Image: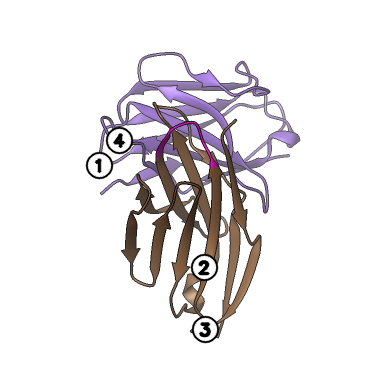
Amino acid sequence: GAVVSQHPSWVICKSGTSVKIECRSLDFQATTMFWYRQFPKQSLMLMATSNEGSKATYEQGVEKDKFLINHASLTLSTLTVTSAHPEDSSFYICSAQRTGGLGTQYFGPGTRLLVL
Amino acid sequence: EDQVTQSPEALRLQEGESSSLNCSYTVSGLRGLFWYRQDPGKGPEFLFTLYSAGEEKEKERLKATLTKKESFLHITAPKPEDSATYLCAVQAAGNTPLVFGKGTRLSVIA
């Protein structure tokens, strides 16, 4: 149990386009999901906390108008990188916390974004 | 401010050579301490959650322990497939995000 999927796993796009990444909890409900960014050989950097049915909470320094998060159901959260630029190229990982659970987060496999 | 420090940054072991990874933490009211394994290019894989000092959990060659100030991940007779980055994270009381350490990169040489 506790499987989280992400789609797509790889995306290459042109500068200025928008990219949507989906995060799904496949076998449990997740009131809260999290979005992270990871640079090579570095640890996870939390971008935002996404709660079902409400606005996401963004970490300091993360532009909410650039990284749009929607958590419309208990099993799906989406991250849209708007007007992507090469500096947005990174590894994006989501995690989901089981509703009513004791805090354990289960991570997706990640999405590699390359902006040309 | 909640903090997690992992040591060593990198560890190279011979196959079968047991060792321990350290995770020191300061947190205002520990709700849980988490260990994850991350392989290159993949998301972290959940290993253990520890909730209170004195608690221990085991899975195959791995054993996690917890005190009031630190946690250890013991690796017994490691194999090359245990090579990965091991991440430690803590969650303070309440539904706050996890605070991660920078990880320990483990290499097990055959």
Q: Are marks 1 and 3 on the same chain?
A: no
Chain B shade in the render? brown
Chain A shade in the render? purple
| Nearest-to-viewer mark from 4 and 2 | 2
Q: Earlier in the sequence, mark 1 or mark 4?
A: 1
Q: Which residues are magenta?
A: B26-31
Q: Amino acid at mark 3?
A: Glu
Q: Which residue, given by chain and number where applicable, does mark 2 sit on?
A: B20
Disc 4 vs disc 2: Cβ atoms closer than 8 Å?
no
For label 3, the crowd category at 10 Å Cα-Cα, with few meaning under 14, some 14 to 19 and many 20 or more, is some
Mark 3–mark 2 Cα distance, whole angstroms, equals: 14 Å
Mark 1–mark 2 Cα distance, whole angstroms, equals: 33 Å
Mark 4–mark 2 Cα distance, whole angstroms, equals: 30 Å
Mark 1–mark 3 Cα distance, whole angstroms, equals: 36 Å
| Nearest-to-viewer mark from 3 and 4 | 3
Rendered image: mark on residue A98: 4
Q: Are marks 4 and 2 on the same chain?
A: no
Q: Please, what secondary structure does the residue beneath circle 3 have?
A: loop
| Nearest-to-viewer mark from 1 and 3 | 3
Residue B29 counted in the magenta span: yes
Q: Please, what secondary structure does the residue beneath circle 2 have?
A: strand
